[in-house]
Amino acid sequence: MAGLLRVGGEDQDRFDRSRRIGWLDLDRISDARVLVVGAGAIGNEVAKNLVLSGFQKITIVDMDHVVGSNLNRCIFFTKADASSRALKAEVVARGISSLADSVDATAVVRRIEELPPSVFAKHDVILGCLDNIAARVHVNAHSYAAGRVFVDGAMEGFLGKVTVVRPPDGACLQCGMNKTHAKVASLRFSCTGKGVVFHEPRLAAEITTTSVVAAVMVREALKVVSGRHGLLLSNLFYYDGQNRLFEEMEIPLDPSCPVHARLADRLQVSESDLSQWNVQ
Amino acid sequence: MELENENTVDEIIESSATFWKKDMGAYVLRKGKKVLRGGSSLVDAGIRADDVLELIPDPEGG
Ligand SMILES: [Zn+2]
């Protein structure tokens, strides 16, 4: 009967415990469109956390397929996926759809660089779950130009890092890069005569650090979508799980960073600007 | 390491990574809670004698 409270009703509400966090705006969270770039280890954890947190409209971009060595840290990948060389974006989209009926997951089996720049403006927040610097530079520049908050996650071994980029003010990911980043980015690519080949390094990786990074990333996305920008990391979370270190650091804005110079000149992102980073 | 005022952060990162035989990869130099810009000199970055700078790896994986 209307107006009566049913004893124990709150235990049937999927988000009852989330609602008890006063500032979480679950209506906006369920309406928000989230772009997850990369469906590897961090992408799996981020996608899982997004759905359990109430996000429903999720686009997952990745062109790669599952291999056996992914299975120590990817919740949605199975041995059968590795055997069949299943596509990561599709497996993750299926996996999160099984967590809640309301999920509207879209898998895009392409490199992010192949998508039109308009894809960034069509989403409310961008979560970078990438495995290389060149793709990060690309997503950083396009997210900034589209005016969308970009939350980038990275890890290696027990080291993790989350960077929050908030256009139109403040530093971007590239502001914190130096010559070592350019050198690593260039080493990942080589010309074979028939095209450009990407060399994927076999980096140390395990689930506990992946989980920490993904948890921080999705919590930042919750703040963005709930309108709590004042609570956001400013602007780097650094985690060294081996040496018991958790720190917030600051990347200062670099006036010579091409991302800001470009905006100042009111120019669009051009591919030539990104060429030094081997962004295709 | 002995550093000069005109040394850039990029130069310090490269020489210290070599000196300590660090693995190939991306690194940043921090002073306290701030990440230092690669192109800036120690003077530009406001670094003084006895300041402690720390070289930290910048993870790439995902
Ligand atoms: Zn920048």
Image (cartoon, coloured by chain):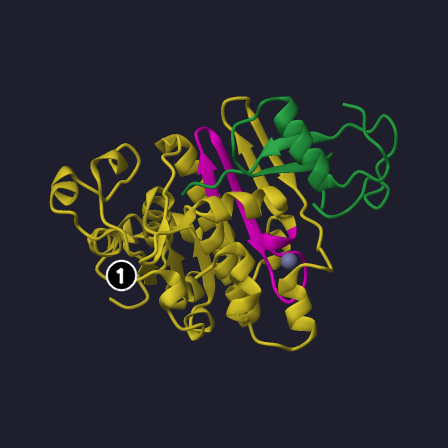
Chain colours: A yellow, B green
Label 1 crowd bin: few (<14), some (14–19), many (20+), radius 10 Å: some
* Tag 1: amino acid: Val
The single residue placed furthest to the bottom in the displayed view is A266
Q: Is residue A155 magenta?
A: yes
Q: Residue at x 65, y 53 (%)?
A: A175
Tell me: is circle 1 under 8 Å from ligand 1.
no
- Residue A246 screen position, x and y as percent: 58, 32
Q: Residue at x 42, y 44 (%)?
A: A214
- Residue A125 screen position, x and y as percent: 47, 62
- Most foreground residue, A81 or A187: A187
**Residue denoted by label 1:** A109
Q: Residue at x 53, y 45 (%)?
A: A162
Question: Is residue B16 something that shows in the picture?
Answer: yes
Secondary structure found at label 1: loop
Which stretch did the figure color magenta?
A: A154-175
Q: Is residue A160 above or below residue B50?
A: below
Chain where mark 1 sits: A
| Position of the C terminus of chain A by quadrant | bottom left
